[in-house]
């Protein structure tokens, strides 16, 4: 069970169909895509000594060659370790070393610092822009992908590491198959006429979403910017049509803002799957109003990649159901390949409406953490993945997330969930971004503190925001303090670093 078999199959079925693009420039047909992956596999085996089960790390920006590397590694029987190129080279070096990577493919911009960080005797590094790399495509190709079992490691994903060192999530071939089947069954159809655009990092969810488009013989486009630019995406949609992409909520907000500015209605975009962070109700309502029914939501973690719950396009666009706003505030219902339940600290299932930790079981759940049996045992309990996310399930099976368990604020013995407060504050016209954390308090245990980024040119003060909160949520939930900042700290994946916000509060108090 090797993902490279999917590309080999498409190389025959869709031989002359366009496969890879850099911007609007075609770089490979499906036959060429498959042939290049086979040649890279031959080079990996014969020149670098890659054997079945070895790890190949990739530390470079998005490019069409990224997909060739992924499939070349799988063809050779290796597992891939995609590293977000926004990480510091020392962070990337730690990941490559921890993974025991035998080879790292890096870009010219990061390779020298990576070599220095890894040091003598570490894994080999090759630059994607070098003549030595280009020569790999001339290697005798491997005729067939290496046979791999369903439970063999395919993708070693390192968590973002907002606290402590990141952990390597072991994603198997069977996990990938479950994700593909779940997408096609529950999220969206895929057609040969589709255009998969990689505007988010291919080291993360955007890259994981390549498989179903390879299977169906669709086009794969890496924008000229190698990332997300709203105006560029709108132009691509008009040029290529049937665009499908994975986007973080921040990307959706930027796209909608640009669409409003230029009068764009979403034409040429077929599906935007959003996830990876909280999408607030006001933002997705506006997105559908501006661009139409093109948005679907997924909730997942690296430990169950893209596969816990989903909210398909019809549900995101629904304005008829009596509880449509509640459903829109949720992350949808479980994938057909997963079981989801809400549990307490003793792993006992809670009733509908009660808030507890989200637990997941199914074929999509990771096999464990790389070289970390203690963390694996703590996270997978009796076959259930303890996600660390707090949520509640309604009677119809829709899951509404509150926060990470560590982010829950306990004030006066009462749980306050930051996302609920954030939703309310973001509905204020002056607020562009907000993140809510708890601050230790001798009397109450914790107080609610809101870090606020105002809209450009907007003005506001504590009294205005306080009045807005009192009009919309219980008084005890409103922030006791507002901190106005130019931006919120985020990690390489765009997630707000609440740990940094708490640290800044401690520094303010001690100064």
Image (tube, rainbow, N blue to C red):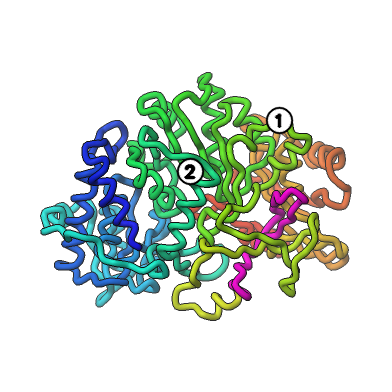
- x and y percent of residue 242 in the render? 42, 30
Tell whether position 99 is magenta.
no
Q: Earlier in the sequence, mark 1 or mark 2?
A: 2
Q: What label does residue 319 carry, if any?
A: 1
Residue positioned 31% across, 50% down in the render? 67
Question: Residues under labels 1 and 2: Cα distance?
Answer: 24 Å
453 left or right, relative to 189? right
Q: Classify the position of the N terminus by image quarter.
A: bottom left
Secondary structure at badge 2 equals strand
In the image, 441 versus 428, the foreground residue is 428
Q: Are marks 1 and 2 in contact (CB under 8 Å)?
A: no
Most extreme residue toward the top, as rendered?
A: 263
Judged from the image, the secondary structure of the residue bearing numbered disc 1 is: loop
Stretch in magenta = 380-404
- Name the spot of residue 299 as percent of width and height, x first: 59, 51
Q: Circle 2 sits on which residue?
A: 246
């Amino acid at each position: 069970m090797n993902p490279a078999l999917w590309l080999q199959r498409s190389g025959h079925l869709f031989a002359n169909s366009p496969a890879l693009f850099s911007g609007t420039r075609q770089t490979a047909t499906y036959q060429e895509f498959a042939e290049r992956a086979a040649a890279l596999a031959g080079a990996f085996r014969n020149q670098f000594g890659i054997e079945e089960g070895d790890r190949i790390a990739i530390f470079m920006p998005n490019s069409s060659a990224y997909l060739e590397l992924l499939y070349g590694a799988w063809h050779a029987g290796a597992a891939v370790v995609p590293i977000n190129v926004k990480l510091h080279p020392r962070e990337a070096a730690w990941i490559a070393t921890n993974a025991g990577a035998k080879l790292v493919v890096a870009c010219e911009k990061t390779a020298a610092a990576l070599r220095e960080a890894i040091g003598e005797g570490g894994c080999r590094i090759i630059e994607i822009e070098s003549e030595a790399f280009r020569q790999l495509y001339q290697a005798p190709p491997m005729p067939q992908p290496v046979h791999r079992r369903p439970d063999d490691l395919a993708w070693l994903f390192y968590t973002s590491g907002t606290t402590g060192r990141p952990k390597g999530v072991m994603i198997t071939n069977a996990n990938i198959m479950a994700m593909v089947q779940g997408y096609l069954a529950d999220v969206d159809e895929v057609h040969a006429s589709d255009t998969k655009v990689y505007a988010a990092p291919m080291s993360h969810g955007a890259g994981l979403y390549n498989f179903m488009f390879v299977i169906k013989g669709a086009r794969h486009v890496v924008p000229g910017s190698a990332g997300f630019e709203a105006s560029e995406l709108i132009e691509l949609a008009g040029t290529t049509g049937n665009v499908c992409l994975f986007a973080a909520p921040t990307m959706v907000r930027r796209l909608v803002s640009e669409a409003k500015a230029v009068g764009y209605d979403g034409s040429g975009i077929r599906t935007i799957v959003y996830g990876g962070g909280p999408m607030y109700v006001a933002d997705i309502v506006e997105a559908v109003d501006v661009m139409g029914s093109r948005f679907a939501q997924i909730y997942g973690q690296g430990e169950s990649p893209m596969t816990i719950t989903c909210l398909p396009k019809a549900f995101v666009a629904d304005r008829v159901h009596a509880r449509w706003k509640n459903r829109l505030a949720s992350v949808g219902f479980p994938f057909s390949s997963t079981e989801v339940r809400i549990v307490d600290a003793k792993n006992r299932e809670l009733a509908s409406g009660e808030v507890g930790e989200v637990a997941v079981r199914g074929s999509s759940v990771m096999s464990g953490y790389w070289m970390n049996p203690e963390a694996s045992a703590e996270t997978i309990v009796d076959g259930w993945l303890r996600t660390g996310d707090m949520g509640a399930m309604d009677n119809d099976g829709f899951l509404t997330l509150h926060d990470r368990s560590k982010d829950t604020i306990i004030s006066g013995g009462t749980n306050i969930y930051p996302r609920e407060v954030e939703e309310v504050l973001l509905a204020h016209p002056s607020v562009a971004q907000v993140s809510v954390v708890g601050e230790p308090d001798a009397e109450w245990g914790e107080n609610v503190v809101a870090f606020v980024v105002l809209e450009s040119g907007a003005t506001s003060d504590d009294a205005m925001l306080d009045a807005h909160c009192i009009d919309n949520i219980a008084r005890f939930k409103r922030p006791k303090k507002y901190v106005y900042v130019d931006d919120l700290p985020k990690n390489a994946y765009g997630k707000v670093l609440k740990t940094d916000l708490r640290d800044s509060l401690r520094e303010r108090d001690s100064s």
